[in-house]
Image: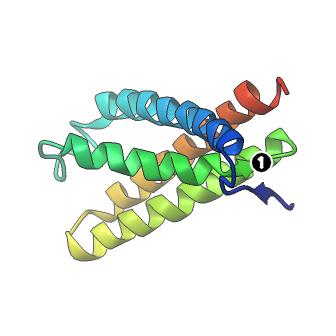
Amino acid sequence: MRTEIIFFDSIHESMKGTTRGLIAFISLIIFDFIWFSLSSKTVYKTVTKKPNIYAAILVYLVLCSAIAVQLPKSYSEALVYGLLVGFVVYSVFNLTSFAIFNWSLSTAIIDTIMGTINCGIAASLIYFIYFKNK
């Protein structure tokens, strides 16, 4: 499977990329809000304190940028790319937290799985909302 990635080399491409990024941003926020609402007292009880909202927004912007640069030719390309981005990003973060901040292995694994799924959903939504109608 081969995919195309675009970097914004013109205003027109930048606007299209911003639209894709906005779709990913909204998807990531909604999914995480639902997930954390359901799991914060169980999965994250030992690691959650008051989150830094500004840092979280920066993380979402970087993450949605990584997802939005892809130009998939099919749904499966979009899904696999989104899952791969999610797996890499969340694995690095969670395994680092496991190694340095004494997170439990189960929390690191669960968060990696959910982050991978979240990014797959975001990439899928970009495909269905943005590319499927083109």
Q: Image check: 52 left or right of 19? A: left
Quadrant in which the N terminus is drawn: bottom right
Q: Secondary structure at mark 1?
A: strand
Q: Pinpoint residue 20: horizontal percent, then vertical percent.
A: 63, 36
Picture mark count? 1
As rendered, which of 61 and 122 lies closer to the eye?
A: 61
At a point 27% along the width and 63% down the height, the residue shown is: 104
At a point 44% along the width and 27% down the height, the residue shown is: 30
At a point 68% along the width and 37% down the height, the residue shown is: 16
Is 125 placed above or below 43 here? above
Is 47 placed above or below 104 here? above
Quadrant in which the C terminus is drawn: top right
Dot 1 amino acid type: Leu
Say which quarter of the image contains residue 127: top right
Number of other residues with Cα within 10 Å of mark 1, as a class: few under 14, some 14 to 19, many 20 or more? some
User: For mark 1, what is the residue?
Assistant: 71
Q: Pinpoint residue 64: horizontal percent, then vertical percent.
A: 52, 45
At a point 40% along the width and 35% down the height, the residue shown is: 32
Q: Pinpoint residue 26: horizontal percent, then vertical percent.
A: 48, 29
Q: Pinpoint residue 41: horizontal percent, then vertical percent.
A: 21, 36
